[in-house]
């Protein structure tokens, strides 16, 4: 008997709510282009539909809301000049913008791992509900990328220098700290989880100090300096500029900027090397080029933000 393959995303009306359920638990609900192409038109349809009052996005599996985008497929495409490396980012960012501008309440239940592409599916919505199982991070500088999907919009708007810290280090926020940081708007207790991790809240003062350029040598800041030393120097400089600019831009303008940055990464070296080291060979020893912050010129960074002309993202 041939069994039908499971749909990657479930789109249902439940009462007056449109419900999007990501259904790829074996790959931690990683977001691919076919899922984006199903979610976007349905979201626009529900937004215009008088019988739909709100949209809810959630995931199956209990372990992850969405652990990120389908980076491996994008990497393979980018290596051979396949249009997927353009289409994925373009259509993902168009969906992020649709979520950020949705006229109906959009509620993301970020229960479990929420990283990268999963952040883009949740953080721009009106309500983001975390549980003790929520694990939030934007770890892109570790794979030669940058915190995209509108990271340049929401990260600089977090308290103090927290957004810059999360963007550069890929630090993981857990449970209630996701709510305390302002990433989630609400916290719902989950009876399955007994303890909550409070570390980050205690470190907020340290974070502000280290990222305001008058760092004191606490154990925490020393550890973060070590983390930064392992990241792509090009990604760190791109990300720093992204957040500097993004703090004063609309979500639309941030996504246009980030699309330019994504294509610069597709043209470059570090993204492919980062994916190789972290996701493919898993040797965790990327050979970045340039290998130090000093070797990344301002001109190199500025070129990542330049217009793509007719290939620019249009929103």
Image (tube, rainbow, N blue to C red):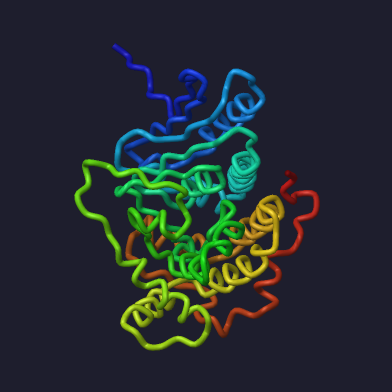
Q: Which residue is drawn at 53% across and 59% down?
A: 147
Give the residue furthest to the left.
Answer: 194
Kindly tell me whether residue 163 is visible in this rendering: yes
Residue 77's spot in the image, x, y percent? 55, 47
Kindly tell me whether residue 83 is visible in this rendering: no
Residue 83's spot in the image, x, y percent? 63, 44
Q: Taking 306 as reference, is 89 above or below it?
A: above
Q: Taking 165 as reference, is 29 above or below it?
A: above
Image-quadrant location for residue 258: bottom right
Q: Nearer the viewer, residue 249 or 292?
A: 249
Q: Taking 271 as reference, is 6 above or below it?
A: above
Which quadrant: the C terminus? top right
Residue 106's spot in the image, x, y percent? 54, 36
The reply, left or right, for residue 313 in relation to residue 39 is: right
Give the residue furthest to the top.
Answer: 1
The reply, left or right, for residue 92 in relation to residue 14 is: right
The reply, left or right, for residue 274 in relation to residue 244 is: left
Q: Which residue is drawn at 53% across and 33% down?
A: 34
Q: Nearer the viewer, residue 75 or 57?
A: 57
Q: Which residue is drawn at 66% across and 52% down?
A: 251
């Amino acid at each position: 008997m041939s069994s039908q393959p499971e749909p990657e995303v479930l789109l249902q009306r439940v009462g007056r709510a449109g419900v999007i359920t990501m259904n790829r638990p074996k790959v931690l609900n990683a977001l691919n282009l076919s899922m984006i192409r199903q979610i976007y038109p349905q979201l626009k349809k529900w937004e215009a539909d008088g019988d739909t009052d709100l949209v809810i996005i959630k995931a199956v599996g209990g372990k992850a809301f969405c652990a990120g985008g389908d980076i491996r497929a994008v990497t393979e495409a980018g290596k051979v000049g396949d249009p997927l490396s353009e289409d994925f980012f373009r259509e993902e960012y168009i969906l992020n913008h649709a979520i950020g501008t949705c006229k109906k309440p959009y509620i993301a239940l970020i229960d479990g791992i929420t990283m990268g592409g999963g952040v883009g599916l949740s953080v721009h919505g009106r309500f983001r509900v975390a549980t003790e199982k929520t694990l939030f991070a934007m770890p892109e500088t570790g794979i030669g990328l940058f915190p995209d999907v509108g990271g340049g919009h929401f990260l600089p708007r977090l308290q103090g220098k927290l957004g810059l810290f999360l963007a550069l280090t890929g630090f993981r926020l857990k449970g209630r700290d996701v709510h305390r940081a302002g990433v989630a708007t609400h916290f719902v207790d989950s009876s399955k989880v007994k303890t909550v991790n409070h570390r980050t809240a205690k470190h907020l003062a340290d974070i502000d100090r280290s990222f305001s350029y008058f760092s004191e040598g606490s154990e925490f800041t020393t550890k973060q300096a070590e983390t930064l030393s392992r990241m792509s120097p090009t990604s760190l400089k791109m990300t720093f500029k992204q957040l500097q600019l993004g703090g004063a831009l609309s979500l639309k303008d941030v996504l246009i900027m980030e699309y330019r940055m994504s294509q610069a990464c597709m043209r470059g070296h570090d993204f492919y090397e980062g994916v190789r080291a972290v996701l493919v060979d898993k040797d965790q020893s990327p050979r970045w080029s340039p290998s130090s912050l000093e070797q990344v010129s301002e001109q190199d960074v500025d070129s990542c933000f330049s217009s793509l002309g007719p290939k620019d993202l249009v929103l």
